[in-house]
Amino acid sequence: MKKNLVMLLLFMSVVAVVAKTISINPSDDMYSDPNHEGITPVITELWTANFPNTGHFERIMMRFNLDELRAVDVNSAILHLTRFYSCPSGGTTATKFYAISENWTEETWNPAVHIAYFQDINMNYVFTGTGGNAIVHFEIDITDLVNRWTSGEIENHGFVIVANQNQKFSKFYSKEHPNDSYRPKLTIDYTQTDNEDICDPPLPLSLSNHPNPFNPETTISMYLPEAGDVRMRILNIRGQVVHDIEVTGASKGYHNYVWNSRDSAGNQLSSGVYFCRLETKAGVVTKKMILQK
C-alpha cells in the first residue's frame, strides 16, 4: 500500500492537469450582402437576415485564432455577441451556425458573395429578447464547433450565421466597435496536461474536398504532418491522370487548392467520378470526388 502511494505521488509530481480560461476577440468578422452590391457593409456592424419581402439575405462570418489550443481538452466555449437592433415586432431571429469550409479574411473576401460551409456541421440558435433599438447580450455555447477545430477534425475557417427562411434582422456589433465591452469575444475553458515527458500526438496526413459533389469548382483541403515535396494527381475513373501538380518543399500544416474541374491543358472535363491522389513524405492518400453538372 505504501509503495503504491509513493508511486502515485511521484506520478502526480510529473503530470499536472491545469484548468485555464481565456477570452479572445475575433481575428476576422464581417457580413456578406449579395443583394446590395453597391453598398459597402458597415464595418462596425454584423447583420443576419433571410427575409425575401425586403430582399435582405445577410450572413455573419466570424473566425478566431485557436492555434494555441491545438490538442487540448476544451471544456466549454462561449461566444459573446451584443445585439443593438432587431425587428421591433418580436425581436426574434432563428438561425443556424455552420462551420465555414473555405479560407477567407475580412480584408480579401468579397462581401457581395456568400461563403461556402459544411452543411452537416451546424447548430441551431434563436436570438430572442427585446426588439427594436435595444442592447441585448447573448452567450452562445459553440463548444462542439471549437472542439472540431482544435482536434484537427476540420480546418479552422470559423463559422457563418445563416438566418432561417423568413427571419428578419438581428444586427450586432463587430470587433471594430470603439467600445470594447460591445465587441464579440470567445471565452474558452480548457484543460491542459503539463508534462515535459508527454508530447501531443501528431495529426495524420489527411485529404478532403468540399463541396462534393461539385460543379464546377471544389476546394481540396489537405493536412501535411511534416514538410516536404508533394505531388497531387487527379485521375478519371479509368485511372488516367487528368491534372497533375508538384510542389517542392511544402510546409507542414493545412493547405487548400481550388480545382476548377479542368485538366492540365485547361480543357473542361465531363461529369463523372474522379480521384484525387496525394503523395507526400508522410504517405499516400486518395479521395473520391464527383463532378456533377
Image (tube, rainbow, N blue to C red):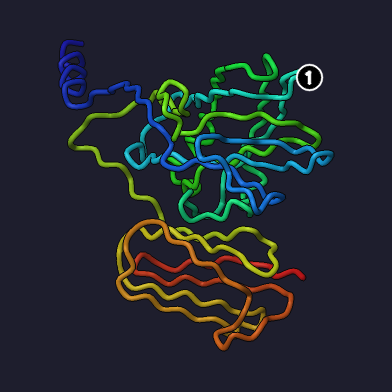
Residue type, numbered disc 1: Ser
Q: Residues within 10 Å of mark 1 (few under 14, many from 20)?
A: few
Q: Does 258 appear above or below 71?
A: below
- Between 25 and 102, the one nearer to me in the picture: 25
Residue visible at 59% across and 83% down in the picture: 263
Q: Does 74 appear above or below 212?
A: above
For numbered disc 1, what is the local secondary structure? loop
Q: Residue furthest bottom?
A: 265
Q: Which residue is mark 1?
A: 89
Q: How many marks?
A: 1
Q: Position of residue 100 (x, y in %)?
A: 56, 47
Q: Position of residue 102 (x, y in %)?
A: 54, 54
Q: Position of residue 240 (x, y in %)?
A: 60, 85
Task: Assign the C terminus to one quadrant of the image.
Answer: bottom right
Q: Residue furthest right?
A: 53
Left or right: residue 4 versus residue 23 is left
- Between 119 and 30, the one nearer to me in the picture: 30
Task: Assign the N terminus to one quadrant of the image.
Answer: top left
Q: Does 87 appear above or below 275?
A: above
The answer to which quarter of the image holds residue 187 is: top left
- Between 269 and 83, the one nearer to me in the picture: 83
- Between 289 and 10, the one nearer to me in the picture: 289
Residue visible at 68% across and 24% down in the picture: 86
